Amino acid sequence: MTIRPQRFLALAQLANSVGDGAFYVTSALYFTRVVGLAPARVGLGLTLAWAVGSLVGVPLGRLADRRGARGTAVLLALGTAAAVGAFLLVRGFVPFVLAACAYASAQSGLAAARQALLAGLVPAGERTGLLARLQSTLNGGLAVGAALGGLALNAGTAGAYRAVLLLDAVCFVGCALILLRLPAVASVPGTATATATAVAVAGERREQRFAVLRDRPYALLALLNAVLLLRLPLLSLALPLWITERTGAPAWLASVLFVLNTGAVTLFQVRAARAVTGLATAVRVLRRSGVVMFASCAVFALSTGQSAWPAAVILVAGAVLQVVAEMQQSAGSWQLSFDLAPADRMGEYQGFFGTGVTVARTLGPLVVTSLLMGWGTPGWLLLGALMPVAACAMGPAARRAAGRAERTVTEPALAG
């Protein structure tokens, strides 16, 4: 593969991540202060939206397989821009939920379509390394966007918040234009198939629709990955609450931990991914990430009741361990998600695997706030204990999925 498609993939990632970073740090205050929604209603609406997004990720991924990954990704990027623009017009709960559902659905589908596009453009042996570089780009863009969003937070005006939403919409339009510069990836069925052949295989295609839902080993991998992704709400939700309510550390430390995380991923994700070269190394790195994440949660728990400086030192140490676990988990899960998915159903399988992110976004806030703010230290330890258990279970699940994939390939050949 030439460097040109890689560069455009990275630029597209950078464009929408800058907008996302600004949106993430300002959206809650926009919906509560400008739109006038109660915080509980905002949380309910986003939970409903990401639940819908998790359901539509698979069919939209399948659409990318059938109609072409590039075109589908472009349309979904434009759809995301339109959904963000709709947030500028909402004035009540129901319109907010509808716009949020459109946003979450377009984001979930875009993630699946981009993974299918990447799979069509990048040889299998290069995907994990490229994904690591894209993850670094993503975090760099989030950091830049968060800084821009911070300017709006400092201004605190409705116009400043609306400017952030406009920026996010423009960034997704830019993402769509960049994706158009990439080579097209052929759809799976092929548009030039003769009518007679299409009729002959129509019944078989109906039977194979959403085959990923019947691929139990792969589905188990996606479920275990969703458990590992419960770390997602820690930086944006759990730690800010924990810092202000359970420690003597200053509230601004939460932003320091965010910058530390995104900066570390930007600088070191590619290096962390070099250790992952196949299924065996992916499983080993995932097991290691589970142990490190448990250690991170245990260190965070030690900050309970500590005064400012001791709490700050402990929280920074926990955040360092957390980002190490994050980079390892990301690299290992990328390898498994691609290597164990059929080449002709990559969008569908990536869409399903990607629902782990939407599940974590949907359930994660409720889980982590209930455990951590409700139970304190025992909650940290319980959350931490889930991580090595799920990570170690990825190994047997991956071996079962690999065995099933081999049988799927060899059985038609034997039958022929």
Image (cartoon, helix red, strand yellow):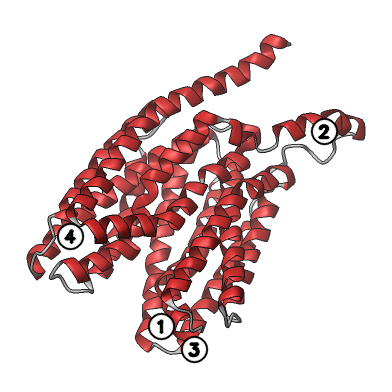
Q: Which residue is mark 4?
A: 315
Q: Position of residue 212 (x, y in %)?
A: 60, 35
Q: Residues within 10 Å of mark 2 (few under 14, many from 20)?
A: few
Q: Residues within 10 Å of mark 4 (few under 14, many from 20)?
A: many
Q: Secondary structure at mark 2?
A: helix
Can you give x and y, in whole percent of width and height, for residue 190 in the image? 78, 38
Quadrant of the frame with the C terminus:
top right
Question: To which residue does mark 1 refer?
Answer: 152
**Would residue 185 be found to the left or right of residue 2 on screen?**
right
Secondary structure beneath label 3? helix
Disc 1 on helix, strand or loop?
A: helix
Tell me how far mark 4 sits from mark 2, CA to CA: 57 Å
Nearer-N-terminus badge (3/2): 3
Q: Residue at x 73, y 43 (%)?
A: 66
Distance in Å between CA atoms under marks 4 and 3: 35 Å
Q: Residue 295: image x %, image y %?
A: 19, 45
The Cα–Cα distance between marks 1 and 2, rounded to whole angstroms, is 53 Å
